[in-house]
Structures are given as structure tokens and as C-alpha cells.
Image (spheres, coloured by chain):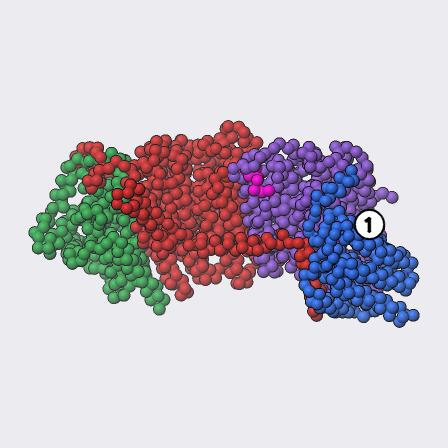
Amino acid sequence: MIDALTGVIAIPAVAAALLSVLPGYRLTARLNVVAALLTFLTAVSLFIVDPRSGPYLLVDDLNKVFIVLTTFVGFTTSVFSASYIDHEIEIGRLTPAFVRFYHAMYQVLMFAMNLALVANNIGLMWVAIEMATLTTVLMVGIYRTHEALEAAWKYFILGSVGIALALFGTILVYMAARPVIGEGLEAMVWTVLVTHAAKFDPALLNVAFVFLLLGYGTKVGLAPLHAWLPDAHAEGPTPISAVLSGLLLNVALYALLRFKMLLALNPAAIAPGPLMVIMGLISCLFAAFMLYRRRDIKRMFAYSSIEHMGIIVFAFGMGGPLANFAGLLHMSMHSLTKSAIFFAVGHIAQVKGTQKIADMGGLTVTSPVLGWGLVLGVVAIAGLPPLGIFTSEFLIISSTFAREPWLAAILVLGILVALGGLFLRLNTIAFGAPRGPTSRAEASYVPMFVHLAIVFVAGIYMPPALVDGFQNVARLLG
Amino acid sequence: MLLVLLLSPLLTGFVRKVKARLLRRRGPPLLQPYRDLVRLLRKEVVLADSASWLFRVIPYIVFAGTWVAVSLVPTFRSGLLFSWSADLIALIALLGSARFFLALAGLDVGTSFGGIGSSREVMIASLAEPAMLMIVFTLALTAGSTQLSTMAAYMMSGQVGLRVSLGLALLALIIVAIAENARIPVDNPATHLELTMVHEAMVLEYSGRHLALIDFASELKLLLYVSVIACLFVPWGIAPPDGGAAAITIGILSYVAKLFVGGFLLAVFETSIAKMRVFRVPAFLGAALMLGLLGTLLLFVSRSL
Amino acid sequence: MVVYALCGVAALLALAPIAVMLRASPNASGVIYGASLIVSVMLSIVGLLNLFAGTSSAATLPLGLPWLGAHFRIDSLAAFFIIIVNVGGAAASLFALGYGQHEQAPERVLPFYPAYLAAMNLVVLCDDAFSFLLSWEFMSLSSWALVVAHHRERENLQAGYVYLLMASFGTLALLLAFGLLAGANGNYLFDAIRASHPSSSVAALVLILALAGAGSKAGIVPLHAWLPLAHPAAPSHVSALMSGVMTKVAVYGFVRIAFDLLGAPAWWWSMLVLSVGGITAVMGVLYALMQHDLKRLLAYHTVENIGIIYIGLGLALAFKAHGMAAAAALALTAGLLHVFNHSIFKSLLFFGAGAVLNSTGERDMEHLGGLIHRMPQTAFVFLVGCVAISALPPLNGFVSEWLTFQAILLSPQLPSWGLKFLVPAVGALLALSAALAAACFVKAFGVSFLGRPRTSAAADAQETDSNSLAAMFFLSALCLIAGILPGIFIDALGPVTKTLIGVSMPHQTGLDWLTVVPIAESRSSYNGLLVFIFVTLSGSIAAFAIHRLASDKLRRGPAWDCGYPDASPATQYTASSFAQPIRRVYGTALFRAREIGEMPPPGATAPARLTVELRDLIWEAAYEPIATFVSYATERLNVLQFLTIRRYLTLVFSALVLLLLVLAIWP
Amino acid sequence: MRGLSFDVSHLLAGSLVLVSFIQLYQDRLYALLNVYALHALVLAASVAWQAFVQDAPHLYLTAVIALVFKAIIIPTALHRIIVRLGIHREIETVVGVGPTMLLGMGLVALSMVVMLRVTADADPLAREDLAFALSVVLLGLLMMVTRRNAVSQVVGFMSLENGLVLAATGAKGMPLVVEISVAFSVLIAFIVIGIFLFRIRERFDTVDVQALDRFRGERQ
């Protein structure tokens, strides 16, 4: 039977198959949008129908949040990508053949990510995440320029190592589970694992978590495993950068969270919190400093993604209902904001015909809507009110400072440094006398401003239903 | 109030006279300042083209401010009418506003000498005023009040005794008085040598009745400082608020006597010392400030013992 | 009550999108400024009513943190600051009705202006940590947008950048402070915070954080660096708001935390606050004396006055810590009264500077002069402002400083030794700063308004428009009233001190002739009204007598100038030459001031020139190291962007081995 | 039987580690490829043995894949690539062979320590297998980071992956093992093709795009 759960993964799969055969990029673009919309609707319907989770597919509050977020951003990004791709074809950076491939891959990516989110089986989840990785590798390299290929290659190699490490971790988890649950499929099913986690062999779990942390951490983009991320964001087509920053990182994070829960249930195992906190802090500080000397606008925002992933991982590492809530909030806010920023950046790069920050200037004068959109996005991503990220950062810092003053202080330092870096560049991009050529490009502002509007509203008012959901999840995460 | 108006030129004249005598000159007659004022009042005003309305208003402001300040000092009789309307701090502030406007006047015409004058004046004031306030602190803390009458009364009642801080305060006060009244060694009222002028340079462009007012104001100021010193450090003879005619006459006589003594001392001091370079003045006044601060600190500490 | 206030704020917020819609239309500025004028007036009426009613009313909106809601309360303290904010706001709006017409990029000012006003009101109204910080940072953000409104000048962007960084630093410091107060499980309500009595060490840390956080916004030395950059960069009516009002909102933040939320203070807090205040006062005014940019001079003066305010607050803390309630009330009243006074005359002065800038296009005093002839009314109100800020009777600046002195004179009764030594020193610093302020404003007014015009721009300046003049005259009137009738204002502050300390100063308005008697008449008293009457009376008597008796003949002629007749206005004293004596006295030590004179050889036609170089030691000591460190660190780390894949793999590998080692040695 | 099976699997796993060491020792590409073939061979044997011991027939498939694909196809393909691209035959090492060996020893010791801390109730077979698998993985990584040539890095990755397969097969009754091994074979194929397409001669990092365009030109 086809319930909403299977729908979430079935629709993209079917769409991918269709798109790979259908001709005509305009049609495929529209179809892409439609498919994404359908997926989003089915995802929303999860809240109404609330299907049972079977042996392969799983649905609970945690992944509901992720699924809805993923499908929504996937949908808006498809809308953005339609207008973006139009322009790319006009200026001849892409051939229709590549565009067809691109759309098919887009749906495959959506399929993989949704699968990773709904998989009730650690093996299946691993497969899905790797699938997503390889798809994005192909899309990053789609421009076939020297830089693009190098970026894709780097991403591919580092990704494969990450894959290997994650797999080893998964195997170890199975080994830990087998003596308790018994051989076979059962020992890889989340729902079963969680129930028996207390009796697992702690030492094995520890080793497993180390490998999983590094394996999936590579996907999350935690320093020092981040190396693939900036180049992949900078060289790939902008919709993919948006999806990477907004979604793929989250999906990998989701996997990490699952395993964290598993370890948290086992008293004898090491607490996963400290490891995550340390890696989070390292990433946050490191990325904050890396923001300063960036010349490529997309690479800069890629580093800002690393920084925010660091903050989120820090929050989840600290744990506790408040920090977890804040982490979830921060994650969703960051996905929306960062993808919105990439929408803006994509159009800006098309208008300016370059990604070099030095060649942009006075955007608020030459193209006000894009310019102010970018300013708003940067204000949001820098954690200034009244936008959502301020709320989450407020909660994270204020709730952790009483517990771990020094860690919170370091985090604050990182945030401050990052703000400095972002606005240093924003000054040159958005203000000052206009620089560089400015060509016309019909852009679709709707997705960008929809995202920003959501973030803005969330900064001031959060619907109680959403809050209850988040609080449940926060309690789930312990 | 009128008394001070009458007395102040006399004091100036007296000081000049004594100085002249000390220099073996006959010097101008005692009443010369009155004559000067009258002469100036008769003369017409020559106003620079670039002078503004402010330039013509300032003399009155300065005069009025100084006059009010003087009339707040209990000269021969404590508890004067309205003496509670402003205490010593307010009094200093009044003089400050007078100086503020005078300095503006120096800048108004737009000449280089006016600039010299007012810039040096504010520099001196920027040290003299804090010093004065420190002195006020010392006295106020001793007397437990900043109200001149109360302070004078407290001083008169012998319960003060000899205090180090009071000595310091007196010393500082004298220095400040010299600086504020533009006397040697800080400034020389009798010269128009551009390198040394401070006060005179500011009022260089004034003439006629305006100049008369300003001179009058500076004479009042001299009187004020002398009488402040008198009423704070040698308060004996000041008539109590409810004193009868006899007490008042005694008060007046003693007051006049004090004035002449003070004037004499000032003259002697001036003739015995040389004018100092403008940029050595800060050190001079800084000493006053330090003395005042020291006095206050001593007081703070001794209070706690 | 609070509901009305919130309605006003909502109205202001609603103006922002309207401004965005109207940005094309020519009369947009009229609409926006007019509307915000009306709203500010209403809000200040609300504040007044509330202050005199002395009631405290609260409201909760389902905004902000969902499980908490956004709490708002208007108690007497809030009401007092609401008045300050909105009086300033109303004046600024009125001024801008005229001034805003000349704005070349209105679409970059109009949307943010009402938002900024709303944010400042919100900060004062908020009653829980989250909404407080949100509006606090929103205030910074909107003012940042206004600072970079004229973004084509490079230095404005720089100023905005430094400003935003410092503002976020302050917010984060406050955030940490509230994090400590609220605890791990986050009870952010101010009531809950009041109820929870933090341990002494925690309270001390919170105080230090609050001092840093609120202080960085108020501009205490050494966190003041952004202020003289950002305030002049904004349009003048916004500069007035930033300098006159926003710094006061920062003071509100500090008062709220230090006096209200933290509970009983420890005695040494006051030493911290006092020394900061004293240093700030003197450094601020000395910096100001060295400037020749009119608006920057005013900005530095804000720093000085903030120092005076903090001295008052510090004394209040000291007295409160030692349970001397009456004295504490006096000191706090002095501080808060100075808050009010400074907000008035600083706005007035910035308006004046704006008017000058508008009609001459010059901010540099060296290019001004003689404006009193061309713009007499502006000159008059500016003079009033100068007298007031120089703390000269009978205007309002003197009253608050006088009260502060009285508070200092009470301090010998303080038992603790540290304070015994500190307070007189602070008193000396205060006196010094007062005298220097007078010097500074002789310079400011004398050089820019008096004398002869130094440039053609100054020579053919035009008197500014009626709206601006109305605003300025309104503020000057306030200065005079607050100066000659201080009793009313002191009594108005009664409920505030009552809520914060428990007692208020003795009732003033009842006394005959409206005298101000802080403690006892035998001790000290001041009567602005009488002094004013006396001065005017004796002045007019003298005038009358002289014009009756003496000759009132008058002849115009060239300036005599000791017999050096010259036409060139270039020979006038300039701002820097005026400051030279004081620079010689204080500058050599504090600014490493050096004067380099180049004398051309005899016969050469080249002009001799004298250049003065000043160094900002605080900037060099505190800020440049940070910048250099950041650039160094970024340069070092930037290498990581350009490694080979193998090296990246090495990173991964070593991370793995490290973690495994950790596991291996795990107990 | 139990004892025997244990010894045999132990022997095979151990020899796998040994072969990894031999790989580390090589300084010629061809020799390295041959050793890798041996590595794959040993892996195939051990997988087959596991299949026999756990009588899990699907594992035989994995063994066959290992044998055919890794031990025969890949090495030959790499041979050809080396010839086609004229990659020169020495292996440039970052650290000398001796230190590398020492490092390897350390890694093996580390993996032993980490793994043998596993409490005894996990069955010894799995424990040993895991320890060896881990050391093979680590040695593979070590090889990737201490060799400069692209080909030798690929070999390192492949031996790493062999370690994974060993672990997977050692995990008794673990599902999806076959799928995983297939997936990895595909991955490796990708990498090899990548090397070929991008004309990556010496380093992983230098991508030769002109070559790629030429290639596309041939295709269309």
C-alpha cells in the first residue's frame, strides 16, 4: 500500500525516472517543480495521517521535522532553480542535455535524502546518504570547468573515505547489537536498537560512534573534515549549493543525532556530548576566522554554513531540553536563511557575471531588491534580531553559559568574529559606489523572500504547535 | 550690595598706590579708578565691523554675574538677604559663566589677539576652577556645609582649631585668587605686551562704556576674592544676622580693614615677584590643585580616624 | 497604561513599511516625520501621566519565546526613560520635518527612523530578558542602517562596521549576564530574576558584564571608540537621537540591572563604576577639545557626560551598599537628572550642528566662523546649548552637576577606605571635566559662530528653516526651565528613586522661592530662579543706568587688534590654535601630541606650516592589537584553504587516530 | 571444528594485515599492484571461509566479487592506465618506508588495544576479526596519506575497503553485506574511471580538463 511515508520517497523516484527521459528543459523544469511540490504536500500530510513505521520505514517526531523542512526547501529551491537554469542556458553555460541530467539528478537527490530520513535501518540510511553524496558529486562537477572538476574530485575522494568510515561504524553498531538482539535484519532496525540499547556492549559502541562521528561528520562539514565543502559550494550550480547547505548537511546531522540518541541510552558508553561540543566549537571558531579572507562570495557563505553547523552540533552536544530545542530551531532557521542567501547570491552572480566579491559593489544601488535581500539574509545569518537565528543563539548561549561558562564564551567569540567577517564583506558587496558591470537577469524573488519572511516571523512569533513538536523532539534527544 | 560697588574701585586704586609706593613712585591717587570709570563711560564706543550683538551684550552679562556673585558673599554681616539662594559652588559657577562669556567676547571680533587671550584664559581657568572646587570641598567638609554664611559662622566659633588641610586650602585659595584676578605672576593687568597678555588681550577690542563695565567687573572680582578669603579665614568681626547697629558698624569697619590688609599684602607680593611664562602657569596652578586635593584627602582620612 | 505605550510603538513600527512604500513620493519625509512626531508626543504624554501617577502596569503578548511570551511593564523608571526617549524623538522628528527635506537618499533613512524610535521605546518597556535583548540589538541594527545611510563615503561604512561590532559585543556581554541571571533552565522573566538571589560572585560577574555591555553602548572609556565615528556619520537628527537618547537607553539598561535586578550591591562595585565614570568624563572632554569636526566634538562630549552620569550612579551604588538611603537617593537623582538634561542639550547642540552643516555643507570648524551674523537664531539656541552643557548657572546643566557635588560632599561618612580615597579623586576629575567642558564650548561656539567667516561657504550661509528652529527653541526653553525650576524635576524623579532605593529626596517644590535643598538648608541650597532673576535684574539695572547716565554714542570702525590692521580672516584663531595651550598642558602625555613646524628658508616663497599630530593611545592599545591578531590568525588559517587532497586526508586520518587514542586511554 | 574455524579465520585475517604491511613496503607501482591482487585474494579466501563457517551462501558471492573484480580486473586496468598515461613507476613517499612501517605497527597496536577492550561476552572470532579489520582499514588510510601517487592512493583506498568487507563478513549474519561490497566495487570503479578521465598522472589534485574535453569530443 502507498501511504504518505512511501509517497515521500516514491514521488521523487518516479519523477527522477521521468525527467531522465523527457526532452525539453522548460518542461522538465516545471515537472521538477511539480514533483517537489507533491513531495512537500505528502510530507505535510504526514502530520495528518500519521502512518505507522514498518521494518524499513520509520516516522516519528524527530524525522517529521526534518522531512518537512527538507521537502519544503527542496520545493522552493526547485522554483529558484527553474529561473536560474533558464539564465544559465541563455548565456550558454549549460546545454539542454546537461539540464535534463541535472533535473533527473535533482530528483534522485531528493529521493536519497528523504530515504535517509525515513529509513528505519542503519544500513539503509547509510546507503541513502552515500547515494545523496555521489549525486551531489556529479552535480557539483556539472559545469565541467577546471575548478568545478577539481572541486567535484576533492568532494568525491574525501566523501568516499567518509563513506568507508561511516560504514565501519555501522558494522560495529551491528556487532554491538547482534549478541543482544540476535543475527539478521532485526539488529539494524532503529526501533529495535533503541529498545535494547542499554544492554549493548559499551566499548564497541564507543568505537562505533568515533567512526560514525568522523564518517557522517565529514558530510556535516565539521572541521577538520570540512575540506570538500567550500569548494563544492563555490563551484557547483547555486541551487545545488543551496541544497547542500540547507539540506544535505542536515541529513548527515540527522544520522549523527540518531546515533547520539543510541549512545545516550547506554549508561556505560562514553557520553557523545563532549566530543560533539568540542568538534562544534572547533568548526565554529575555525570557520569564523576563515570568513575574512574570502574572495568568492559563495565560498564565503559556505564557510558560514560550517560555522553554523558547528553551533548546531555544539547545541546538541550540550544537550538538555533548552539547548536541544535551540539546536533544532537553529538548524531549521539556518536551512531557510542560508538557502535564501544562496538564492540571492545566485542571481547576484548572474547579474554581475562573476562570483568575485571584488567585482561587486553598491548592489543596493544597482539592483536594490537583490541587494537588500542579501543584506537582510546576512543580518539574519549573523544572528541579529528580529530574525529567527537570534532567538536560537540567544537560547543556546544563555542556557549554556550558566552550565559551561568557558565553552559558551568561546562560542560567543566565534559568533562575534563571524559577524565581523560577514559584515566586512557585506560592506563591499552591498554598499559603497557601484562597481563592475551589471546585466539584466529576470530573477524569481519569491523563494528568497518567502524564506526570509518565515525566518522573520519565527524571530518574533512561533506557533505553539511547532513549539510543541520541537519540544517533544528535544525531549526525545534527551 | 552697593557697598561692594563703592568699595571695589577703591581697593584697586589702593593696590596700585601701594605698588607704586613700593617702587618709589608717587603713583596715581587713590580715587583714580573712579575717574577712569567715569571717563570711559563718557567716551563713545568704537565697535569693530565684525562685532556681533553678542559682543555688545556680554559686558552687561559679565558685570551682572560678577556683581551677583559678590553680593552673595557675607562681607560684614552673615546671613545677608537671599544669601541662601546660592552656595559657594554656585558662586564659583557664576564667575565661571562670566569668564565663559568674556572668552567668547575675545573670539567675537575675529582678531588674533582676542584668540590668544581667550585660549590662555580658558587654559588657566581649566586648572583654577577645579582647584577652587577642591578648596571648597575642604572647607565644606570641615564646616559641613557649602553655605558661605554657615561656613563663616562655623569658622568664627572657635571649634575649628588649626587644621593642616585648612592651611593647604588657604595657600591654594591665594594662588587661585591671584590667577583668577590676572595678577602677577600669572598675568599683568598693566601691560599690553602681546606675548604676556591674557586678560587684557581678550578685552582689547572693547572701548567706552563696555570697557568701563568690564573693568568694573574685574575690580569687583578682586574685591570678591579678598572678601571670600577674609570671611572664611579671618571671619572675626562679621556681624551676626541679628546683630544691631553697633555690630554692623564694627562689621563694616573690620571688613574695610581686612580689605586694606589684603590689598597691601597683594601689592607687596606682586612687587616682590616676577611675571612667569604663560606655560609655567599650569605648574603653578597645578600646585594649587594638588594642595586642594591633598587637603580634601586629609580631611576624608582624618574624618574616619 | 503600558497598552497605550505599546500601541504607540506598534504605530511607529507600522510606519517603517509605509516608508518603504512611499519611498518614491516627494512628500514621504513629511508624512513619516510628522507621524512619528505625533506618536512621540503621545508616548511622552503617556510617560508623564505614568510617572506622576507613580503606578506600574504590565502586559504580556504571545510573542517572543512561546513558553514565555513577551512581557512589558511600565514602572516609574521606565516611564522616566520613556519621557526622555520620546521628548528627544519628538524634537528630532520636528527638526527633521525641515532638515529631512535636504536628505539626498531619503529611502535609506525614512524606513529605519521610526523603527529606531520604536526599538528604543521597546527596550525601556520590556520586562523579560529575551525581548529586552531583542529590542536592544534591534535598536543597534536600525541605528546601524541609519549610520550607513550615506554609504558612499568610505568612512561612514567603516564607522558603521566598528559600530555594529561594538554593539554586538555589548549585546553578547549582556546576553551572558542574563544567561547567568536566568540560570540553566532559563527563567528569563525579570520578576523571576529579581526573586532569584544570585551568589555574590555571580552577581559581581553580572555587574561587570552589564558594565561592559551597557557601557559599550553608552560609550564609557575604553569602549567608546565607535561612538565618535558613528554618531557624526548619521544624518544630524539621527546623531541627536543616538547621542542624546540612545546612550541614555544604555544607561537605563545598566540602572535596570545594577539597581533593580541584582538586588543589594557590594561596596566595591561602586569603586569600579566610579573610577570608570571619572576616567570617562575627563578623557571624553579632552578628546573633544582636540577635535575640530563639530559633530565629532559633540560626540566626544557625550562620552564626557556619560562619565558624569556614571559618577552619579557609582555614588548611588556606594551609598546604597552602605545603607545610606537618603544620600543614595540624592546621588541617583543627580545622575538621572543629568541623564535628562544631557538628552535635552545634546540633542539641541546636534540640531544646531545639523543646521550649520545644512546651510554651509561644512562640519569642519576651521572652515566656519562668523555664522552669528548669517544665522542669528541658530547661533542663539546653540549658545544656550553651550552654556547649558558647560554646567553654568542658571541653566540646567549646572543643577545636576551641583547635585553630584553635593553627593560627593556626603561621601566622608562612607566607612570603606577605598572609597575614601577614590571619591575625592573622582570629585577632582569631575571638577576638571566641568572646567574643560566650558573651555571646549568656548572653542566650539567661538570658532564656528563668532569671528569672521573663514570660507565663502560660511560667508553666505542661510538661516535654517522654521521647523528646525522650532525644535531648537523648544529644547532651549526646556534647558532654561529645568535650570531655574529644578525642584519640579527633582520631585518628578521621586518615585523612581523610591522604587530603586526605597526612599526619595525630600520634597522640593513646597519650599519658598522654589529653592533646591538636597539635605538641609544650613548645609547647602541653590535657587536657580533667584540667581536668574538677580542676574537679569542687575544686568538690566546696569544697562539702564549706563544708557541713562553715560553716552550711548557708537561708532563702527575696523578692529583695532593692538594696531595690526589686517583684512584676512585667516589670521583668526583657529580651533586647533585655540586648543593649543590646553594641548600643551594635557595633550603631550595623553595624546603624544607633537607640533611639527616647517619653516621655509629665508627668501623662499613657500608658506611655513605647522602640523599637529595626535595619537589615540586607547585605540592603539586596545583595538589595533585585536585587528592585527585577527588578520594574523586569518592569514595563518587561510593556508588550510589551499591544501592538497592528500593533506586533507591526513587531517581526517589524524583526527581518527586521535579519537581512537582517546578511546584507548579511556578508563 | 570451532577451534579450527577460529584458527583458520584468524590466520586469514592476520595474513591480510601482513599483506597490508607488504603493500606499505613497496616502492614500485607494478609490484604494488601485484601485492594488492594478493591482498584481494586473501580477502576472497577469508570471505569464503566465513561463508563456509557461517554457512551463509550469499557470502560466496562476495568472495567471487572480491576474487574476480578486485584481484583481477582492477589491477589489470590500473596496469593499462599506467601504461596509457605513462605514469612513471616509482612511488613517491611522504615519509620514508621505515617510519611508515613503524607507524603501521603503532596503528595495529592501537586497533588491538581499542578492540580487545571489548568485553569478553562478544565471541572471540568476531573480536579478532574486528581487530584485524580495523588495522587493515587504518593501514589503508595510512597508505593513502603517505603516498603521493594517485594510483598508490587508490590502492590504499581499496585495501581500506577490503578491511571493511572483512569486518562486514566477520559480523555474523549481517544483512546487505553483498550489496555493500557491490556498492564499493562500483565506487572503486568510479575512482579508477575518474583517474583515467581526468588524466590524473601524478597527484590526486591535478585535474587535466583539456584531456577531458578531448574525450568528450571523441564521444560525440
Chain D tint as drawn? blue
Residue C381: percent from the left, percent from the top? 36, 38
Above or below for D3 versus A473: below
Q: Is residue C242 left or right of residue C192?
A: left
- The answer to which of A448 and C491 lies nearer the viewer is A448
The residue lying at 63 percent from left, 44 percent from top is A298
Image chain in purple: A
Q: Chain of mark 1?
A: A
Based on the picture, tell me whether residue A363 belongs to the magenta stretch. Answer: yes
Identify the residue shown where x is 34% and y is 47%.
Answer: C611
Rendered shade, chain C: red
Q: Camera-side residue: C239 or C225? A: C225
Q: Which residue is mark 1?
A: A57
**Residue lying at 50% horizontally and 48% vertically, measured from the top left:** C162
Query: In the rendered image, which quarter is residue A37 located in?
Result: top right
Highlighted range, magenta = A356-364
Tell me if residue C601 comes above or below residue D107 in the rendering.
above
Q: Nearer the viewer, residue A19 or B164?
A: A19
As drawn, the chain in green is B
